[in-house]
Amino acid sequence: MNTAQNGIMVEVNNLKMYFPITRGILRHKVGEVKAVDDIDFTIKRNETLGLVGESGCGKTTTGRCILRLYNPTSGSIIFDGTDISKMPERNLKPLRRSMGTIFQDPYGSLNPRQRAGGIVGDPLKVHHLADKSELNDRVAALFRLVGLDPDMSDRVPHEFSGGQRQRIGVARALACQPKLVICDEPISALDVSIQAQIINLLEELQETLGLTYLFIAHDLAVVQHISDRVAVMYLGRIMELTTSEELYENPLHPYTQALLSAIPIPDPIAEKTRQRIVLRGEVPSPANPPTGCHFHPRCQIAVGECSEQRPPLRDIGGGHYVACIRV
Amino acid sequence: MAAVLDVRDLRTYFHTEYGLVKAVDGVSFYIDEGEIIGIVGESGCGKSVSMLSTVQLIQKPGEIVGGKVVFNGEDILQHEANGPTMRSIRGSKISFIFQEPMTSLNPVLTINRQITEILELHLDMDKHAARERAIELLKMVGVPDAGSRIDDYPHQFSGGMRQRVMIAMALSCNPMIIIADEPTTAVDVTTQAQLLELMKDLVTRLNTALIIVTHNLGVVARYAQRIYVMYAGRIVESGLSEVIFKNPCHPYTIGLLHSVPRLGEKRTLKKLVPIYGLPPNLIDMPPYCAFLPRCTYKTERCEKDPWPEMRQVGEGHYISCYVDIRETS
């Protein structure tokens, strides 16, 4: 119960999630995809931890491990004081009540044949949190919470716009009053003018309900805006973890620097003077990652040692963690 | 410098069973030789349809109902869509790079076949010469080991590499204009940076005009010299990118710029200001300004008068709005 008291919601230690690659009729194992390869981080209560990286870097897998949608290969996940990484299936149901998820695709993540009120009310029924008489009121309250008109609860998903659908997704995630909400690319499928509506909604809900977010996205500008601290992932490992201000003002890992410089900002005058680091090559396959530091083949400051040993994620002061021997 | 492409009052309507959709409704833009322009807008604003309309790649129920597309001093809308003139322009003088490198390459043909096909068709090359040229093109766009990769199929390439192949194909006939329709939306940011830098270097070197169609304001800010902002089938603001980003005058452009988070801006310092409401349904549009329901600057006049014509507010800077925002704010 120690972690629960010192204000930490989630503590992930040495988390590994390897997926087997199988071949043939007997499906014998011929290799492994190291989707998440030994990572550590914590999420404090009432904070937003951003998890950013390119596709295939393991950010979604990390989120799913915390939700225990996957059984991690090794490592521990301490959620609210309890290690859940090896918890048996039958004990997971009450656990999942305290975690909500918002998915990327507001089209694919809602049952097209179910009415919006049913989608939002289902978690309440599953966890027996509301009896029939209360259910409608609870659903209406959730609709209002996310800025939807409760009269719309009889409609089916295709009658809503993309932004409204994502609001339904948010209402469903909040139905059981979770402590932690995992937002997996919640805005990347939305139009630019709608994205800000959802970002603001998430921020307001965090303030009013005291939520803790794990915010997974590939757009560093959005992640930085919403997060208190940001972890940058590359090929299954955390490269840098620090507060979002520090990450922007003082990025130390060469990958973070490249990632920041790759994002064009909507200001042509600033763009002219910005330094650009264009990375060589492409992200290697997580089934066959480079030795040593995973980033070394594309790194501009790599030395011989980089290909030999995995650099540890070390604190260089003030909670700024970097996994690079050249820093 | 003469405009290499000058589109005037282009209109493309779709006759759907629910009603008339004015996907492109009076769009005018031009591009000079070797220039890079950006066309920005959200999905469904008509940016792709207006690009496809310039080379008459519109199918039923769509129809180009009006306007002029002056290319090389000649209105090419006069030519038959499937006639020899249009076919000699498409893919050769005006070429496209599409968003989805996965679906815009034929999965059952080798890269060699797909590039040499264009060269044989448009430039009358023989098989051998076309293959040599194709390898050269692949090297130019940075496909490693081009000599052997050319015989691979699209699925053997990564997303970024496929998009490089698309760029090679677009460049194959030394086009005067390349239209890149959301060229990097399907790839990661570091790959996006690689591809955009590559495209910029190549078009600058070859003096090709480039139209970047995107919803990403950052991309146009970085690469485009001039910008057109589209909303509901029309251009609502146009001008030099430095001017538009510094001093946007149309309420939609202003809203768009305030609604995207910028790097290094934290929420505690600056909250995002979303554009409330939704983009309009393009079926049976009201006669007045389509942005009106979402506009925070609207006046009484906006509801009475028809959609405002483009008017000049600065040097080369035009907006389609009655309100002078610098005065009211």
Image (tube, coloured by chain):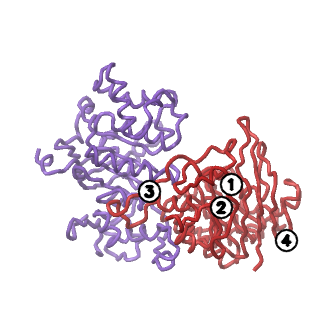
Earlier residue among tags 4 and 2: 4
The circle on residue B73 is 4
Residue for badge 3: B273
Q: Are marks 4 and 2 in contact (CB under 8 Å)?
A: no
Three-letter code for the amino acid on which mark 1 is drawn = Trp
Is mark 2 in CB contact (under 8 Å) with mark 1? yes
Q: Chain of mark 3?
A: B
* Residue A188 place in picture, x, y as percent: 47, 51
**Label for residue B320?**
2
Please tell me which of labels 2 and 3 falls first in the chain: 3
> In the image, is residue B17 above or below residue A278?
above
Q: Which dot, 1 or 3, sits closer to the camera?
A: 1
* Residue type at numbered disc 2: Ser
The amino acid beneath tag 3 is: Val
Q: CA distance from mark 4 to mark 3?
A: 44 Å
Mark 4 Cα-neighbour bin, 10 Å: few <14, some 14–19, many ≥20: few
Q: Colour of chain B?
A: red
Residue highlighted by disc 1: B307
Front-most of residues B272 and A29: B272
